[in-house]
Image: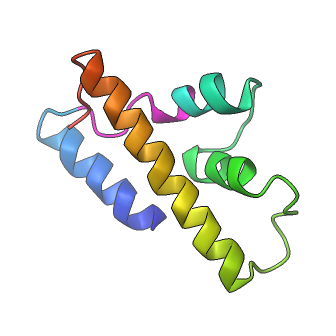
Amino acid sequence: MTCFLDGYDYAARRSGGRGLEGFRDWLLADHLRRQSSFGWSGLIAQIALPEWDFVTDLTPEQETHLLDVLFDLLDRYFAECEASAELPL
């Protein structure tokens, strides 16, 4: 999923859109409320699975939960951008 969204981000920016610009900062400010060196995909994992050690393989249930959280957060982010007339497309 990360590769797909990175591709979307690249294509959107290449076409003059914002892509996922600001998504990482939005995650930090609205959901983690602390600094992190992780990219957006690592931040999603921290939000979705705070107990996960990033070493152990994810179970199928954890992977499903992680994707559910990812799409929920993307929906919320895009809705906020649209509401503020800053649609990142």
Please provide percent x and percent y for residue 9. 31, 47
Q: Residue furthest top?
A: 84
- Does residue 20 appear to the left or right of 68 in the view shown? left
Residue at (44%, 28%) from the top-left corner? 22
Residue at (38%, 32%) from the top-left corner? 21
Q: Residue furthest left?
A: 15
Residue at (88%, 58%) from the top-left corner? 51
- How many numbered marks does the figure carry? 0
Where is 58 relative to 2, above or below? below
Looking at the rendering, the stretch of residues picked out in magenta corresponds to: 18-25
Where is 8 relative to 86, above or below? below
Please provide percent x and percent y for residue 72. 48, 50
The secondary structure that most of the magenta stretch takes on is loop
Magenta region includes residue 48: no
- Does residue 49 appear to the left or right of 12 in the view shown? right
Q: Nearer the viewer, residue 11 or 79?
A: 79
